[in-house]
Amino acid sequence: MSQLDIILVSYNTSEYTKRAIESVYAETHDTDFKLIMVDNDSKDNSVELIASNFPDVEIIQTGANLGFAGGVNIGAKASDSDYILLLNPDTVILDGAIDKLMAYAQNTPQAGIWGGVTLNNDLSLNPNNARARLSFKTLLFSALGLSKAFNKSCFFNHDNYGCWDRKSEREVDVITGCFFLTPRKLWDELQGLDETFFMYAEEADYCIRAIKKGYQPRVTPDARIIHHGGVSETNLSGKMLKLLKGKAELINKHAKSWQKPLHKGLLLLHVMNKTLSLNLLSLIKKDKIPLRDQWRIVYSQRKEWLRGYQ
């Protein structure tokens, strides 16, 4: 029995997955761990590549694309450690980040969920390591474009904690699932991830359920990783549809009855404003804006994503 089980769900990301696993072995020295790769029926050479390069990695082939939550839950059932770390295949562990995150977890057990800081490939800050839960304020400022216009403001960009430079530890609402540590005891108590969320927002749901039980997720700046983001979903409209479905499902599950139509209306307003602004920009420039058609697709499918994953 290892101290930590690292669960990595792969889907057509063979080279990224190989790089992520290499970094885990190269940068993790103080933690006894087992790495479990759950492959969601990749059509590239992911399974063969990882099996031939890393004989110690346990590989589980699902035979179908079960989404992130479904894949993680299968990996967790095959594990028996004290802690579970969710790790995306498009990440790179830096400077002993897993060892540092484990030490932080043991020093702050009341958090229940721990994360680190995410960087872009050029080592610039990627602020998507943590965020606030959906609320009227975060949805309104996003819909009006204020969170983007004032992205360094914690008032207008509370969603991404805009004024936080990620150089200090902090309590947060949601830890991003790309680098997400939680104890086995809490995982079992919450029964893992809710598989209603096929992809995106499942970690937010887990964090909200943990907070309701008295835990408070925390981030440490000492544990740093590179996170590329979205490498298995290269089509913007496809990614946005899943993101919006995830947000709508969070509203379905956690918002009060009177809040649900209001919050979903703000989600729709965000997409409407984005689509209209790109159409206007295209007219002004008298040229086709590449993202315009992608957002038109998203808006045209609003009835579908507003229902969530139900």
Image: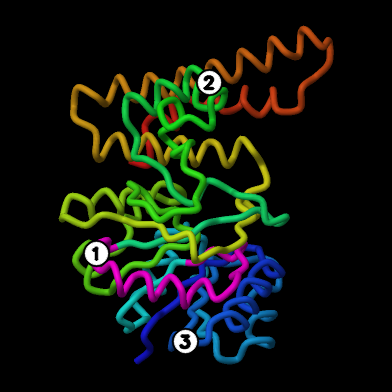
- Would residue 92 be counted in the magenta stretch? yes
Element at badge 1? loop
Question: What amino acid type is highlighted by mark number 1?
Answer: Gln
Q: Which residue is mark 1?
A: 191
Q: Residues within 10 Å of mark 2 (few under 14, many from 20)?
A: some
Task: For label 3, count other residues whose C-alpha is less than 10 Å away and answer few (under 14), some (14-19) or many (20+).
Answer: few
Q: Distance of mark 3 from mark 2, alpha carbons?
A: 44 Å
- Quadrant housing residue 268: top left
Could you tell me if residue 58 is visible in this image?
yes
Label 2 sits on residue: 145
Residue 106 lies, with reference to residue 173, above or below; the image says below
Mark 2 → mark 1, Cα distance in angstroms: 37 Å
Residue on which the image places disc 3:
30
Query: Between marks 3 and 1, how big is the CA–CA gap?
Result: 28 Å
Stretch in magenta? 87-112
Question: Which of the two residues, 118 or 293, is positioned nearer the viewer here?
Answer: 118
Q: Eyeballing the image, is 9 above or below 124?
A: below
**Which is more N-terminal, label 1 or label 2?**
2
* Kind of residue at disc 2: Gly
The answer to the question of whether label 2 and label 1 lie on touching residues, with beta carbons closer than 8 A, is no
The answer, for residue 232, to whether it is visible in the render is no
On the image, the x and y values in percent for residue 124 come to: 66, 51
237 drawn magenta? no
